[in-house]
Amino acid sequence: MSRERLARKFPSLIHLRASELGSMASDRHSVMYGEIIRWRMLFEKLDSVGAKADRLGWKPEIKMETLLQTLHDHFVGSLRRASGRKTVPMYKGTPADFDRNYPIWRDACRDVEELYDYLLSYLPRRLEVHGQNRDLHHMLRRPEEVRSTHNPIKLLDVARSQKPDDREFSDWAWVRRSAQSKLVLAQSFFEYRRAGYAPETLEDESVLIKRILEQTLFRRGSKEKVKIVAALDRDHAFACKTYRYAVPRESSLPSDTQFTIETNRYLLRVGEGIPVLFFIRPKRFPVLKGLIKDIRFPQLANIGDGVAMTFALDSESDVDAVVGSVRRVLVPCPGSVCDQDSNLGHRGDRKLDERNGSSSKRFKAMKYNALVADRVVEVQFSSIRDFIDSRCRHDDAHHGCYKLQQYCRDILPILFPEALTDVPWPSDFVTNDEVTLPQTNVDIWHQLVTHVRAHDNKGKL
């Protein structure tokens, strides 16, 4: 079960009913028992410092600064290797440690809110659940006292608060759950930021890599803005039937049977100058990959790619030439490429990644991870037709639905537990005849998929 699997890495993200909590907490060898004890240790430490501040009459700002320092030492402590010790001491960090790390904590809290907004973009505003039409965005929105707070001490106060007399039990439980989740996710974002996966860091690195490619791989001055209009086949899962290059100012609105995209096209430096569509972007939330794959602490490096690039060609027959050019220019060093997979050409009867349960035979590409400018980059090659299919097809080739499947299985039930939101997320996905469907809540899955396809077709996701 994904919840039990995730509990081993992120125990504080698991929502348990009182009966479940009592059962797990009674087992001294369970991860939840240890997690409860650790939270109590933190609370006792903060309560002790807070009581001392009140007893001595400290000013509120001094009290808050001391509580934040205490929380910092409990979670992070000194980052410097102590003289004569073989391990890094976790407690009693210096003021310099706190000054360096507390801004990262605040940024990590902001990252959490951006993550929630991103996940809500995958969900329709209205969702029919058990025969009732519900405002999903309103239901899943974090309470304002949590959303607007980037101070971890204040979030802890909310997470520990007693139920007010004027508040429903379910509302109060959702507020506490939201505050606790934000704290735990912020700690994860803090770890990712210190490991070089801050969104702004990845954005800067993607710009740097793009500049390197424009100078070394593509012909100087060949960059041009192009507009592609594709006709989709309604009778064959809305696959790309034909596409053409349109006049940039040509008016063309997306529809069920038409897809439009504007992007940059380049010519390769070598040979006859094969035209290439080139896309590069930072991975927006590597922490999601960590949650899906249960990656934490020393395994953080296993996240790997923080930047993704795609080369799309008019003809699949040109892929080999482009792969060769990229190999000579971008990754010429032995040992700088790993995890290479392909289902193009004679490999077309297999998944792109056989180890990935969400991967589909219908998504056609070649990809690998490469070390470029000291950053692991995901490099992908495909035909323009296959690229359009990944945005438009109404089957397993659709990239947005591939991500949605992962989120329904590993993310949404954790951050928006059914016990609090009353939203039964689809789960237990099974693929039959290249069509993947959940074993439960199929009607809700179809509503989510319709939303994702519509927005992806318009370039929203």
Image: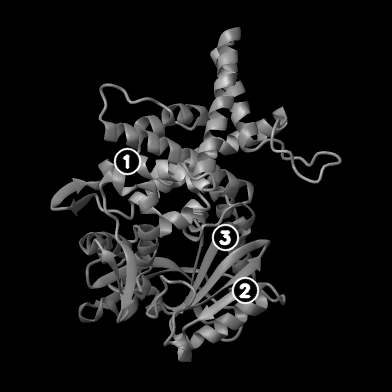
Task: Residue 56 in the image: state x and y as whole percent.
Answer: 61, 8
Q: Give amino acid for label 2.
A: Cys
Q: Give amino acid for label 1.
A: Arg
Sooner in the amino-acid sequence: mark 3 or mark 1: 1
Residue 248: mark in rendering: none
Q: Please give left or right for residue 260 compared with residue 68 in the image.
A: left
Residue 338: mark in rendering: 2
Question: In front here: 124 or 16?
Answer: 16
What is the residue that sits farthest to the left in this orientation? 131
Question: In front here: 299 or 324?
Answer: 299
Sooner in the amino-acid sequence: mark 3 or mark 2: 3
Sooner in the amino-acid sequence: mark 2 or mark 1: 1
From this view, report whether residue 30 is shown above or below residue 371. Answer: above
Q: Please give left or right for residue 55 compared with residue 397 in the image.
A: right
Which class describes the residues within 10 Å of circle 3: few (<14), some (14-19), or many (20+)? some
Q: CA distance from mark 3 to mark 2?
A: 13 Å
Question: In front here: 327 or 129?
Answer: 129
Q: Secondary structure at mark 3?
A: helix
Q: Secondary structure at mark 2?
A: strand
Q: Please give left or right for residue 281 compared with residue 84 in the image.
A: left
> Split into 4 quadrants, where in the image is the C terminus?
bottom left
Task: Residue 127 in the image: state x and y as whole percent.
Answer: 21, 52
**Residue that badge 1 annotates:** 141
What is the residue that sits farthest to the right in this orientation? 84
**Residue that badge 3 annotates:** 303
